[in-house]
């Protein structure tokens, strides 16, 4: 962890102490600063606060929102809600996994370009199946359309 | 004389996904380019409105000229210039782009209470909410009614919790109000986690002030000075609109000190959920607000006695709270006159799946299911055969064709082995496999089980394993009985509602579709041709035209054939993805 990271963490700790010591808020703040929850940061936080690191890891691994590894530059979220499921989200996901060359259990591409995630429901069921890239919502998707959209994000990189 | 021109663009999540922002920009740019001078522009406003329910037709646009309104559907930015040219300037609406009779039948059968202002007012403008009598109910309650009268009025209205179990709201408030404490809390549960339900998101996106007003009334009734909205971080637009609404309400003196000049103090904070389905459970939600792992605890003590930070707390769902301003505006008797004997008022359902008109609907409690499916929903997509409606999400069950005349309310749904849940209604047709659906929900509940109690943690895992082997063609004789006995144990012995209801999809599908389970186990066959391990794809020689579309679509290189001659599939290479089945225009690919 470099000096810059340390000072970021100091600031997070400062906000944590002054706002009443809510662990979820601290982790959300940490993730906002670093993009994920770095292991070193948790240990440092544990030392400073006197709360065991296991407590922080316990909370971080409980909620789907927290990531213990760095994520890709583009986040591709495939909705797997009921409506999306009956309209074929499975096939979109397996096509995306192939397309991105992700091995079983892998979520982020080697070049750090994309992270593929599943979400239980984004509540856009009437335009199922839904894929979200970064914050843009794409409705009524097919495996082909999804790959086409994905390629536009690839092109942006090479430009 | 200049005409008054009003353009409304649907800007819910569905509308935005379909290109609502671009359509709105196109209108703005179009009016500017058309050289509409300043005096016209003053009367010409492009408004953004919240969800109007019929998301399948997005982008929906209303064009009103001097109050004459026409509604367009499926609007894209490149269609806007023609609308401006012919309709706005020329006065001739473009009939072929307008909504048809089915749009009206979708809306005509509905009774809107909670959604009555969604899609009509700009959710980001507090003045528009005030102009439809917003905050009047709260002002009257706070100034003219006692907290005890307020609780009584809600009891009289018959309002029941819209989040799932349907507990009477007034009774819950009464328990909390009876407690003496230096602090009390009211929490709005907006952690809408049921896959297939999105009414809470739409209410907050479409009319956030109704939720704030409802919470204020609730806080006054129980004596709380602080409220929390616990909302999913996956709903960015709803969070943004709620934040703005809270700030505007504070600026108007509708939140904060001495609200509506009544001497009552109350304010609301937003708490972002960190993504855990179990946090929909009251005690887990409280743990999560406190910054802990969202694990439920045993009840009693109930939150009404010992809740957030150990203080008496009421937790109500978004839709429940959004009903309150309307109940107090029009009277509890009016509300109680809607609905069935024990379920009063209306219910918002998210109608999705294999149905023609998907979207958000609000109907009186007790409406027959048939009316929802065929009159409002327009029937099954592609005119295929109706199979079942799945209600209540992962905690619910199926309603089959034999119960299609059933009046939909809390009691009736439980009677047939399902539940209201938060109001997701996923329509399934003959191409859906019920074993697969049960497995889908178990995958969800198994992953979301918090792990605290053994029956839920291990029971759901074993249920899922059995379902998985059945769908993979490895089902064993006796598996159905094993599922039934295990499911009942998990139901009886789990600590919280998640575990107690997780087996419902299994029990309900076995109850009504036992033959599908049997076909998987004994005949190694999936009747709906969904389970990959149990189906094969083949090309019918007499129907194949040799166009080569399937050959190009196949990701595994399993299809071979010369142009204009029947193709064939190499079963050893086939990955059963179904791409060929989807692309074939001649129905030459057989799946069985």
Image (spheres, coloured by chain):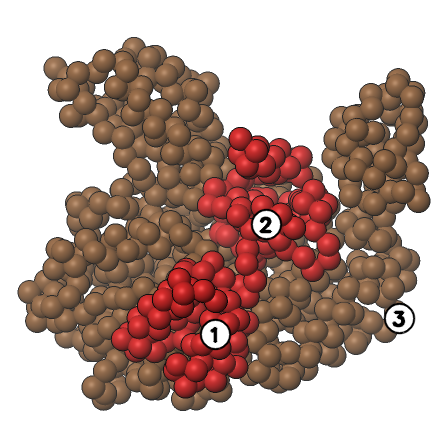
Chain colours: A red, B brown
Circle 2 residue: A112
Provide residue A96's location: percent of width, then percent of height: 67, 45
Same chain for labels 1 and 2? Say yes or no. yes
Circle 3 residue: B477
Neighbourhood count class around disc 3 (C-alpha, 10 Å): few under 14, some 14–19, many 20 upward: few
Q: Whole-Å distance between the Cαs marked 1 and 3?
A: 50 Å
Q: Nearer the viewer, residue B94 or B233?
A: B233
Q: Residue at x 65, y 50 (%)?
A: A110
Q: Quadrant of the C terminus of chain B?
A: top right
Report the side of B179 relative to B522 (left or right): left
Q: Provide the secondary structure element on which disc 3 rests.
A: loop
Q: Provide the secondary structure element on which disc 2 rests.
A: loop
Residue B89 visible? The answer is yes
- Mark 1 falls within which chain? A
- Mark 2 falls within which chain? A
Q: Residue at x 39, y 81 (%)?
A: A48
Q: Which mark is residue B578?
A: none
- Mark 3 falls within which chain? B
Provide residue A128's location: percent of width, then percent of height: 57, 44
Number of on-image labels: 3
Q: Residue at x 53, y 71 (%)?
A: A39
Q: Which mark is residue A42?
A: 1
Q: Whole-Å distance between the Cαs marked 3 and 2?
A: 48 Å
């Amino acid at each position: 962890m470099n000096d810059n990271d340390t000072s970021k963490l100091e600031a997070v700790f400062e906000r944590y102490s002054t706002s009443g010591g809510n662990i979820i808020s601290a982790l959300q703040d940490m993730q906002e600063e670093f993009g994920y929850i770095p292991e070193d940061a948790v240990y440092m936080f544990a030392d400073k606060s006197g709360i065991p690191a296991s407590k922080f890891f316990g909370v971080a691994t409980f909620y789907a929102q927290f990531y213990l590894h760095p994520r890709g530059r583009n986040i591709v979220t495939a909705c797997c809600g009921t409506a999306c499921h009956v309209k074929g989200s499975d096939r979109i996901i397996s096509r995306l996994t192939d397309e991105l060359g992700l091995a079983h259990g892998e979520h982020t591409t080697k070049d750090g370009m994309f992270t593929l995630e599943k979400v239980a429901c984004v509540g856009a069921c009437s335009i199922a199946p839904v894929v979200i890239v970064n914050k843009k919502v794409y409705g009524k998707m097919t495996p082909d359309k999804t790959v086409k959209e994905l390629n536009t994000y690839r092109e942006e990189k090479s430009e | 004389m200049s005409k008054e021109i009003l353009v409304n663009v649907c800007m819910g999540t569905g509308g935005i996904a379909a290109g609502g922002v671009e359509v709105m920009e196109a209108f703005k740019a179009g009016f500017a380019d058309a050289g509409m001078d300043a005096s016209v522009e003053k009367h010409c406003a492009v408004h953004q409105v919240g969800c109007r329910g019929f998301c399948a037709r997005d982008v929906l646009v209303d064009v009103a000229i001097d109050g004459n309104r026409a509604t367009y559907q499926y609007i894209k930015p490149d269609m806007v210039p023609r609308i401006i040219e012919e309709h706005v300037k020329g006065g001739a609406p473009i009939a072929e782009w307008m909504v048809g009779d089915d749009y009206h039948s979708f809306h005509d059968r509905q009774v809107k209470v909670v959604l009555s202002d969604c899609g009509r007012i700009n959710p980001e403008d507090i003045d528009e909410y005030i102009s439809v009598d917003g905050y009047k109910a709260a002002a009257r309650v706070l100034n003219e009614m006692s907290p005890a009268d307020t609780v009584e009025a809600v009891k009289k209205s018959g309002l029941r919790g819209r989040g799932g179990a349907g507990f009477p709201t007034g009774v819950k408030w009464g328990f909390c109000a009876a407690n003496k404490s230096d602090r009390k809390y009211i929490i709005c549960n907006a952690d809408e986690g049921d896959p297939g339900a999105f009414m809470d998101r739409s209410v907050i996106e479409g009319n956030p002030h109704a939720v704030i007003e409802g919470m204020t009334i609730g806080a006054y009734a129980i004596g709380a000075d602080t409220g929390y909205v616990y909302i999913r971080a996956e709903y960015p637009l709803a969070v943004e609109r709620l934040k703005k609404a809270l700030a505007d309400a504070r600026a108007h003196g509708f939140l904060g000190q001495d609200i509506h000049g009544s001497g009552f103090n109350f304010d609301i904070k937003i708490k972002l959920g960190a993504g855990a389905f179990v946090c929909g459970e009251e005690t887990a939600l409280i743990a999560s607000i406190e910054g802990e792992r969202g694990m439920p605890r045993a009840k009693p003590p109930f939150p009404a006695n010992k809740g957030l930070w150990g203080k008496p707390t009421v937790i109500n769902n978004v839709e429940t709270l959004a009903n309150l301003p309307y109940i107090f505006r029009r009277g509890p008797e009016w509300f109680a006159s809607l609905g069935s004997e024990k379920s009063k008022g209306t219910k918002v359902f998210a109608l999705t799946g294999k149905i023609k008109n998907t979207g958000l609907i609000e109907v009186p409690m007790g409406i027959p299911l048939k009316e929802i499916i065929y009159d409002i929903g327009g029937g099954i997509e592609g005119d295929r055969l109706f199979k079942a409606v799945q209600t209540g999400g992962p905690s619910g069950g199926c309603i089959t064709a034999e119960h299609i005349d059933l009046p939909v309310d809390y009691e009736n749904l439980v009677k047939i082995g399902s539940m209201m849940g938060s109001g997701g209604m996923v329509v399934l047709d003959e191409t859906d496999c019920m074993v697969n659906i049960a497995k889908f929900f178990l995958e969800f509940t198994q992953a979301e089980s918090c792990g605290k109690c053994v029956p839920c943690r291990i029971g759901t895992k074993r249920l899922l394993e059995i379902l998985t082997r059945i769908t993979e063609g490895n089902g064993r004789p006796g598996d159905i009985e094993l599922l039934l006995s295990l499911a009942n144990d998990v139901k009886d012995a789990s600590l919280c509602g998640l575990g107690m209801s997780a087996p419902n999809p299994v029990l309900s599908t076995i109850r009504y579709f036992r033959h599908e389970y049997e076909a998987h186990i004994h005949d190694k066959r999936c009747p709906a041709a969904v389970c990959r391990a149990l189906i094969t794809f083949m090309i019918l020689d007499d129907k194949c035209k040799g166009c080569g579309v399937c050959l190009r679509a196949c990701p595994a290189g399993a299809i071979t054939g010369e142009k204009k001659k029947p193709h064939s599939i190499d079963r050893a290479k086939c990955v059963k993805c179904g791409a060929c089945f989807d692309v074939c225009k001649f129905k030459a690919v057989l799946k069985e």
